[in-house]
Amino acid sequence: MAMEQGRFVVGSVFWRKVIDRTVAYVPAIFHWPLIWLGAIVFFFVAAPARKALLRNLKLIRPQSWRIANYLRVIRVFANFGWSLTDTAAYRILKARFRYEFEGMRFLDQLASAKGGIVLTAHMGSYDLAAALFAQKFHRVVRMVRAPESDARSAEHVDLALQQASAGAVQVGYSDDGTALAFELLKALRAGEIISIQGDRIVGTVGRENVDLFDRKIPLPNGPFVLSLVSEAAIFPIFIVRTGYRKYKIVAREPIVCANGNASRDETVTEAMQRWAGALQEITRTYWPQWFAFTTLL
């Protein structure tokens, strides 16, 4: 059977269950070699993800040798393995994690806001970050995710988040269409916090080109339209792994899509470009933890 089909596809629930059982029954001292072994294996069998990472790394490091980027791909796979392992350890073993903050004043603004949009990227353990935020600040977070390629994997992710956050993180999927948009708008107007990943296009979601890595690259414009309509600020927040069960939560200055003298389209475009600047800064600094398994172009 091909590794990119059936139960062994990279996004399959099979691998998530393997990680759950490993965390539950294998001593932590063996996790490091198993994760790196898995990263090397997936480098060879996960061809679509490997090719996407190579193309995206070429954007981040245009002067780099191709062989160096091959080694970087393995490192990204290893970090992805650590993020899944840490999330499972937090949920199954109730493991304790250390975390530090960069831009704490912006997190405080989010915690006290009547409603807000967290805009993040596929980095670190964003599921763990959402659960930690919900518990630290006692706020419910509605997380919007791209649909999983495996329906059983989606069920596993939803259940895992519910268990890890004690129900404080609620999940919706970006292919739910207009109904989801109205639900999110209603939630923002009720003072809730929603979390959206804004670093790649999935399916037929609305998009707009921005200047990113000296290219014109499409990014989703939905969060910015939602901010404009709801008048809720956008908070760029990222989580990166800094050591064994240790993370840093990085927050940048909020982006406000306010109606002024500019047109609606100009307001959205300007806000998206500010987000692109924050995304570029963070991904260039923490490229080993950017899980960009689909190409940007």
Image: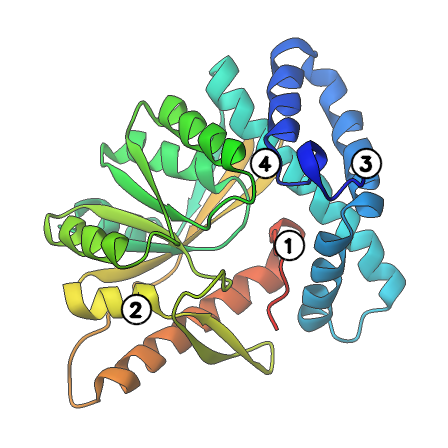
- Asked if the residue under mark 2 is in contact with the one under mark 3, i.e. CB atoms within 8 Å, the reply is no
Q: Is residue 27 above or below residue 203?
A: above
Amino acid under disc 4: Ser
In the image, residue 127 lies at what x, y percent?
45, 37
Label total for image: 4
**Dot placed on the residue nearer the N-terminal end, 2 or 4:** 4
Considering every residue shown, the one lying at the far top of the view is 25
Amino acid under disc 3: Met
Residue 88 found in image quarter: top right
In the image, residue 90 lies at what x, y percent?
49, 22
The numbered mark at residue 1 is 3
In this view, the mark in front (3 or 2)? 3
Cα separation between marks 1 and 3: 22 Å
Amino acid under disc 1: Phe
Amino acid under disc 2: Phe
Cα separation between marks 4 and 1: 15 Å
Give the residue pinned by disc 1. 293
In this view, the mark in front (2 or 4)? 2
Cα separation between marks 4 and 3: 27 Å
**Dot placed on the residue nearer the N-terminal end, 1 or 2:** 2
- Asked if the residue under mark 2 is in contact with the one under mark 1, i.e. CB atoms within 8 Å, the reply is no
